[in-house]
Image: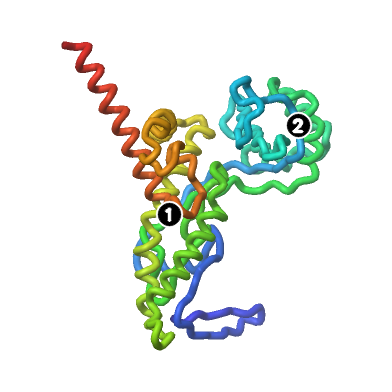
């Protein structure tokens, strides 16, 4: 694998590598070169949304059945457009942190705390009133971040090169899996390097690594892409069949996970294990599809019985 580096003085430096690892983000040049060389196309979609983060707020938000119980909860405040939202995540210390999202470019229009406060009061009437000035203050001081692109590649390798992280499998912040999935890909690469090395000599054939990595990792990152897209459709107020498959899995999994703990390896639906390295994304995807199919079959059976 040869890589050409172009300097500002327009001179070029050509270096050779046994293996090139492209971890150069959503605008990956390595991915672009791989597509051009091998003739495949990555699926790239933009959320069209950016967000600012706030933290350290307190309020009595939990419903009676959750009071006094530990665990993460998510509260979503929506508006009449799918881009403007506020999320509130309960932290272990019972404080709340979250995001304040708007359409890309909208945050730049608000350059005073007062302007943010007017917007928050107008758009989010159910937001705790004492949160408004604090979210406005933190939003004014924070830098807007893109809510992300989703990237799905048919393969993660080319001759002498692989891609990982956002370059290969970017997702939105809905489940917070961007960094997790990138680190998991690093672990898979480490396992692949070990598998392609002769332990007796410490040597191996680097030409075997790219295809082996892609074979081991592609199914999992494709599963995460599907899970992320299904969940994001709810936040975008465009929930489709895939989102309701997730919902069916959580509802059915909560019931059967307690009756048959071995079904998911715990008493919780597999989706709630998202982010645990011991539970592959592809296993979660299969559990969602199985439970959704079970719900459809059950409803079909009930409909058939009512028609008899």
What is the number of the mark on residue 221?
Answer: 1
Q: Is residue 33 visible?
A: no
> Looking at the image, is 102 positioned above or below residue 157?
above
Between residue 69 and residue 102, name the one nearer to us: 69
> Looking at the image, is 177 positioned above or below residue 254?
below
Image quadrant holding the N terminus, namely bottom left
Q: Are discs 2 and 1 less than 8 Å apart at CB? A: no
Residue 150, image x and y in percent? 49, 49
**Could you tell whether 144 is left or right of 174 in the image?**
right
Q: Farthest left residue? A: 308
**Could you tell whether 241 is left or right of 80 in the image?**
left
Q: Residues within 10 Å of mark 1 (few under 14, many from 20)?
A: many
Between residue 284 and residue 166, name the one nearer to us: 284
Q: Residues within 10 Å of mark 2 (few under 14, many from 20)?
A: some
> Looking at the image, is 74 positioned above or below residue 210?
above
Figure coloring: rainbow
Question: On the image, which quarter does residue 210 sit in?
Answer: bottom left
Q: Is residue 5 visible?
A: yes
Residue 26, image x and y in percent? 54, 58
**Could you tell whether 301 is left or right of 242 in the image?**
left
Q: Residue at x 34, y 64 (%)?
A: 215
**Could you tell whether 256 is left or right of 175 in the image?**
left
Read off the residue under disc 2: 58
The earlier-in-sequence mark between 2 and 1 is 2
> Looking at the image, is 307 positioned above or below residue 242?
above
Between residue 8 and residue 208, name the one nearer to us: 208
């Amino acid at each position: 694998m040869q890589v050409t580096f172009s300097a500002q003085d327009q001179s070029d430096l050509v270096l050779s590598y046994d293996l090139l690892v492209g971890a150069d983000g959503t605008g990956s040049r390595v991915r672009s070169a791989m597509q051009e060389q091998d003739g495949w196309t990555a699926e790239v979609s933009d959320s069209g949304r950016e967000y600012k983060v706030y933290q350290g707020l307190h309020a009595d938000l939990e419903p009676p059945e959750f009071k006094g119980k530990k665990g993460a909860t998510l509260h979503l405040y929506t508006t009449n457009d799918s881009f403007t939202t506020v999320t509130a995540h309960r932290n272990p210390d019972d404080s709340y942190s979250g995001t304040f999202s708007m359409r890309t470019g909208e945050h730049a229009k608000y350059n005073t705390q007062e302007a943010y406060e007017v917007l928050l009061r107008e758009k989010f009437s159910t937001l705790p009133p004492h949160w408004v000035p604090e979210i406005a203050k933190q939003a004014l001081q924070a830098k807007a971040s893109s809510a992300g692109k989703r990237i799905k590649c048919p393969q993660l390798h080319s001759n002498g090169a692989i891609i990982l992280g956002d370059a290969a499998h970017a997702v939105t912040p809905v489940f917070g899996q961007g960094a997790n999935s990138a680190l998991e890909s690093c672990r898979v690469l480490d396992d692949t390097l070990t598998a392609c090395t002769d332990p007796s000599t410490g040597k191996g054939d680097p030409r075997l690594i790219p295809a082996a990595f892609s074979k081991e990792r592609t199914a999992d990152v494709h599963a995460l892409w599907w899970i992320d897209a299904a969940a994001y459709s709810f936040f975008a107020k465009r929930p489709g069949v895939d989102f309701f498959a997730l919902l069916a899995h959580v509802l059915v999994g909560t019931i059967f996970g307690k009756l048959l703990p071995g079904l998911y390896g715990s008493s919780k639906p597999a989706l709630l294990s998202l982010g645990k390295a011991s539970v592959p994304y592809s296993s979660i995807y299969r559990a969602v599809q199985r439970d959704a199919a079970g719900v459809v079959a059950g409803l079909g059976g009930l409909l058939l019985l009512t028609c008899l």
